[in-house]
């Protein structure tokens, strides 16, 4: 019996993949979860790592630990290089892994809209590596500004431009403004609060475009209250080591952060499937690949219109729901039972925070702003963090930084080096 | 008055440098602390980061934060490239920084006794970077072992050789044994406790040679109780990607960790000074450089025989005492008062821990072992950690991992990659 157990391979241990694995706990199957990182990442709080508010361990857990108690799951740390739909196996370099059912949940990354050369100057924020490198970049800019001689150079070093005013961009801009204008200034002798400039650039007409307009207006005011310059209806037209171009206007800035655009992972290529412009795989109403009922594409890499006609958005709750739905479909087939009713996306609403005391929350007809919304945002995020331990630590950290304006995770593990060539500002490169 | 204030430059923000800066708080001086890392590191707990017990933020604090309340101190993140004793300035690439008094506290690193090519295969443990890279290496070895097909390969991947049985080597070997034999095995499906092998190799006749012989014997028994193979009187004669040579014996091991030997930083070269074989600068009885009463060399980079004829050892308490002594000498000169009485090293004793329940403590005539010593070790280390916040977090973490055998910091930020060349075990390189 065990020899012939149904083999499910899940590629990706994000919200969709983990949710699928858990929903298969009682199915008569052997489940293998593959990810090229050893941890599940709570992406909604990644901006806190980038702005030195939380440490990596507080928003990530090893995939093995998350799934350790589920006896029918094994976890492999490896990178998928292709999928053979005909022979039903996943390729991992020279190695292959056979499947009876396959769940592809490889997620998405940011998009530079055809300007990939901007990536070097305007890094995005999708992985722990991204966040640690951004943290290093931001902290080193302050260090370089502290010893900068020329005013123009100091001002360039202390200018932060966040591109894209979705939740990530709004949260980043708010956190950087607090870091620059409050938390850090007491540590430096030659930097004063007024020297730092934080700008949020958005091509569309409002921030948080997925939220109701009243909350967009609120978030803009809250950002401006923190000292963030919000530029709406401005598209970035150029990006280099010295700064950013907004049409004819040039902003000299050493720190440009990309929070715009979404590009799905290359699973569409592996599957030879129809994709939209963002690379998302167009799937059938049960998340399966058209023509391949044994293959499911869930989370940010899939594109589905649900039973109510709603296009399922690329957010964490939608990914969890999709992963669980695909798993239930597989479990029902294994058990020889009818599958679940048509998928219907349950919208829990939208949340975004702006700094220490403000947030915007939209749940059905309910709109919350200000401190109450911020409290709700905190509670919701801590609740959904995996594992009691991380929760307790995050609560402790947030309480601490709320009371003290401290940023606990301001470490740059690497040493700076003057060996070899030495321009005065090279520690910022 | 402020224009002509005495300028003190301190190079290095380890125990000696920080202790010197603090002792200058009330001296009429402008103090500049330079370090090429942005943080002070609590090195005695670095092995815990390497073995995934603690996160970097729990044992390190930004130098700026540690010194923020001391108004006469500025901190610069930069790398010293030389010292001009004649013109009294420190070189930082093309930039220079003048001083009236200079304190050199640049520390030491590990030594390969002329076999620097071993460094690639047997990394040491001196910085956060070292610890994170070691953590990655250890965790990836388990991941590779989980999917390894051949028994010999799995056994090589799960063999850990620690070279050098000083406190760091003993603590590392104990922590790796616990990690390998307890904490991790429940997370893996194809690795069992008995497969892991941890070996501690020491060229001398006993472990913890700075401790009384009875404690050395105790520590050896405690290590063996944890499953560590202790090899005394064995020198490493070769080291490569496949394993380590102990004379004629070959140990196939994917994980070799170097905890032997000390090599002082190159300050001796900058100063053109007399050094011992380990590169330590021979200093006068007040830590000053002979012929240069305005230059002090303290901590692991200096070599001093104190007023009682004792060679001051390279341990944290000695570094703190030396840094403070040099600072008091400078402060007395500024104030036109007589200097402090001749330096006398106060020996607080020796502590080392072996795993979760055992430690060896020697304080004057007192010898402690077992659980009581371990409790004392914990209390002492938490007490000396900088900052209330880190203390609280470490207590929380230790309590948690004591109760659960969990290791909270098991993250590898980087993704593995199969792009390009792909040997089956390349994720371990």
Image (cartoon, coloured by chain):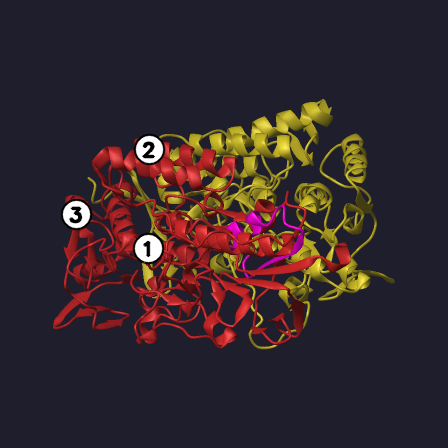
Chain colours: A yellow, B red
Q: Chain of mark 1?
A: B
Element type where label 2 sits in the image: loop
Residue at 79 percent across and 32 percent down: it is A218
| Residue A336: mark | 2
User: Magenta segment: does it hold B18?
Assistant: yes
- x, y (%) of residue A73? 32, 41
Can residue B76 be seen at all in this image of the molecule?
A: yes
User: Magenta segment: does it hold B264?
Assistant: no
Closest to the observer, A167 or A222: A222
Specify whether B266 is left or right of B53: right
Please rate how many residues cluster around mark 3, counting C-alpha atoms within 10 Å: few if below 14, some from 14 to 19, many from 20. Answer: some
Q: Chain of mark 3?
A: B
Q: Chain of mark 2?
A: A
Q: Which residues are magenta?
A: B17-37
Please rate how many residues cluster around mark 1, counting C-alpha atoms within 10 Å: few if below 14, some from 14 to 19, many from 20. Answer: many
| Residue B138: mark | 1
Element type where label 3 sits in the image: loop
Specify whether A403 is left or right of A230: left
Query: Split into 4 quadrants, where in the image is the N terminus of chain B?
Result: bottom right
In the displayed structure, would residue A152 be above or below residue A192? below
| Residue B227: mark | 3
Q: Residue furthest left?
A: B248
- x, y (%) of residue B209? 22, 55
Closest to the observer, B133 or A263: B133
Closest to the observer, B190 or A10: B190
């Amino acid at each position: 019996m065990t020899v012939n157990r149904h083999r499910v391979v899940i590629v990706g241990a994000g919200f969709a993949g983990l949710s699928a694995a858990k929903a298969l706990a009682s199915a008569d199957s052997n489940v293998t979860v593959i990810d090229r990182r050893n941890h599940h990442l709570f992406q909604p709080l990644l901006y806190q790592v980038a702005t030195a508010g939380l440490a990596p361990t507080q928003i990530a857990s090893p995939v093995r630990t998350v799934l350790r108690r589920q006896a029918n799951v094994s976890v492999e740390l490896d990178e998928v290089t292709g999928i053979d739909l005909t022979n039903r196996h996943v390729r991992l370099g020279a190695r292959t892994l056979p499947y009876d059912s396959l769940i592809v949940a490889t997620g998405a990354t940011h998009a530079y809209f055809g300007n990939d050369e901007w990536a070097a100057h305007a890094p995005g924020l999708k992985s722990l590596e991204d966040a640690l490198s951004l943290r290093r970049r931001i902290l080193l800019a302050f260090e370089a500004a502290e010893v900068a001689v020329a005013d123009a150079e100091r001002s360039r070093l202390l200018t932060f431009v966040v591109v894209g005013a979705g939740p990530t961009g709004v949260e980043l801009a708010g956190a950087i403004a607090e870091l620059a204008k409050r938390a850090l200034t007491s540590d430096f002798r030659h930097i004063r609060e007024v020297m730092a400039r934080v700008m949020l650039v958005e091509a569309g007409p409002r921030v948080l475009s997925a939220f109701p307009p009243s909350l967009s207006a609120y978030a803009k005011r809250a950002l401006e209250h923190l000292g963030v310059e919000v530029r709406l209806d401005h598209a970035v037209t150029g990006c280099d080591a010295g700064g950013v171009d907004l049409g004819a206007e040039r902003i000299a800035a050493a720190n440009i952060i990309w929070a715009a655009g979404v590009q799905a992972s290359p699973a569409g290529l592996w599957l030879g499937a129809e994709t939209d412009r963002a690379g998302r795989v167009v799937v059938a109403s049960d998340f399966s690949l058209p023509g391949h009922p044994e293959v499911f594409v869930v989370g940010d890499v899939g594109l589905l219109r649900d039973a109510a006609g709603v296009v399922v958005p690329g957010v964490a709750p939608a990914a969890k729901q999709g992963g669980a739905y695909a798993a239930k479909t597989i479990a029902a087939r294994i058990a020889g039972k009818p599958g679940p009713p048509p998928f219907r996306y349950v919208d829990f609403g939208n949340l975004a925070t702006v700094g220490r005391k403000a947030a915007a929350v939209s749940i059905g007809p309910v709109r919350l702003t200000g401190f109450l919304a911020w409290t709700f945002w905190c509670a919701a995020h801590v609740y959904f963090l995996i594992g009691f331990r991380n929760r307790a630590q995050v609560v402790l950290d947030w309480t601490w930084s709320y009371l003290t304006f401290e940023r606990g995770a301001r470490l740059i593990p690497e040493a700076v080096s003057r060996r070899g060539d030495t321009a005065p500002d090279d520690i910022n490169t």
